[in-house]
Structures are given as structure tokens and as C-alpha cells.
Image (cartoon, rainbow, N blue to C red):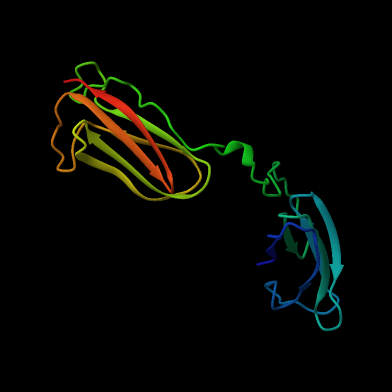
Amino acid sequence: MNENAVVTVNLTNTPLNLTLTLDAATVEFSGGVKPNMNLVVSELLAGTTNTLITNASGAAQLAVALPAYGAAIYMVATEPKSISVPDIPTGVAESNEATLPQTFALQQNFPNPFSASGTFGNPETTIRFDLPRSSEVKLRVFNLLGAEVLTLLNERRLAGTHTFKWDGKNADQQQVVSGIYLLRLEAGNEVRVRKMVLVR
């Protein structure tokens, strides 16, 4: 084996300068790493190549400058290699807060009305809600008498838009009767309610 891959990653939000020691502990060659040995170091993402010469103890120093959340991939070989790497991202994009919902919301289910038997071609309905921050969430269906029909969700959810489907069945997996049902979403101190119409 006369080639080695060395990967460096900066997981911080500040640039990082460091020195890598290339020796028998970090790279491996079929003839070993010896003093005064040429090491051809190709930085695959930048497309650069340098030759380093090991010192009397069989080690060479490689200076690395990494941008915030950046990476570098090196191939260390005993002879030049021709390598072509397509463009790939070298960093992690900052999270875009604007893509997260800004308000707590329960969207109207769709389709509404829907038919759990598929009479109108809609065997289920889709429910969407928005969370601007992570929360403990309860999503439940009630009949007009106030009795709980089904708990669709009862767990912690991350901020974002979430989608669930309801097929018109209760907690015992029995089809419920036609009528108006209330969809109740609770997250922290926030509560939203929507009416759903089920037609058989």
C-alpha cells in the first residue's frame, strides 16, 4: 500500500490552523516510513499537490488551514498521482432560521370533508401543524360530545412543519361514524382546534 487518505474536519465556527505529523503512526506504506522519504501530498478538495520530505526521525509536518465548519481531504503517496474530484461542498451551511415556522399553527386538514371508506376517493385526511420551537405535542381527535376518539401524537417534536394522516379510525382501529370531529393540537401553553368532516 503506497497511498493513504488523511481527513481533517473543523467542527467549530472559527477558522482553525493546525500542523499534522505524517509518520509511521499516521500513514502506512509497504516499505514503511523512512528518513529523507518523499511524500506527495494532494489536497483533493483544493486540487493542490506538495512534496514533503521526512526528517531524520521519519516524520514530515503538514500545515493545514481549515475554514469554520470546513474540511480537507489529503492523499499521501510515495509518488505523484493524477486525481480528479468533482466539486463538492467543503463546509456546513449555517442554519436558516427563516425556514422554520414563525408561529404556532394548526392548518385545516385536507381534504375536508373526507371519506374513510374512499367513497369520494379520499380514504384519509392529511393534518399539518407548525412549531416555531421544540415542544411536547399532543394531537388528538374528539367527537362533538367531547369524547376522545384517538390520540394521533403525544411526544416531543422539533421545531418545523409536521404532517400526519388520519384514516377515520378510533383508538381500537374501528371506523368511526360520519360526522364532525374536532382536531385539537396542544404544544406547551398553546392550543389550536379545527373541525373535520367525515363522510361515509
Q: How many numbered markers are drawn?
A: 0
In the depicted view, which residue is nearer to us: 131 or 125? 131
In the depicted view, which residue is nearer to us: 59 or 38? 59
In the depicted view, which residue is nearer to us: 5 or 39? 5
> Who's the residue at 21% across and 41% down the image?
148
Asked if 154 appears above or below 11 in the picture, the reply is above
The percent coordinates of residue 104 (x first, y second) are 48, 38
The percent coordinates of residue 106 (x first, y second) are 42, 33
> Who's the residue at 27% across and 28% down the image?
124
Q: Residue 196, located in which quarter of the rendered image?
A: top left
> Who's the residue at 18% across and 43% down the image?
171
The percent coordinates of residue 168 (x first, y second) are 21, 31
The percent coordinates of residue 47 (x first, y second) are 79, 49
Q: Quadrant of the C terminus?
A: top left
Residue at the far bottom: name it.
Answer: 57
Q: Quadrant of the N terminus?
A: bottom right
Asked if 107 appears above or below 4 in the picture, the reply is above
Q: Residue 13, located in which quarter of the rendered image?
A: bottom right
**In the image: residue 187, left or right of residue 90:** left
In the depicted view, which residue is nearer to us: 193 or 23? 193
Residue at the far top: name it.
Answer: 120
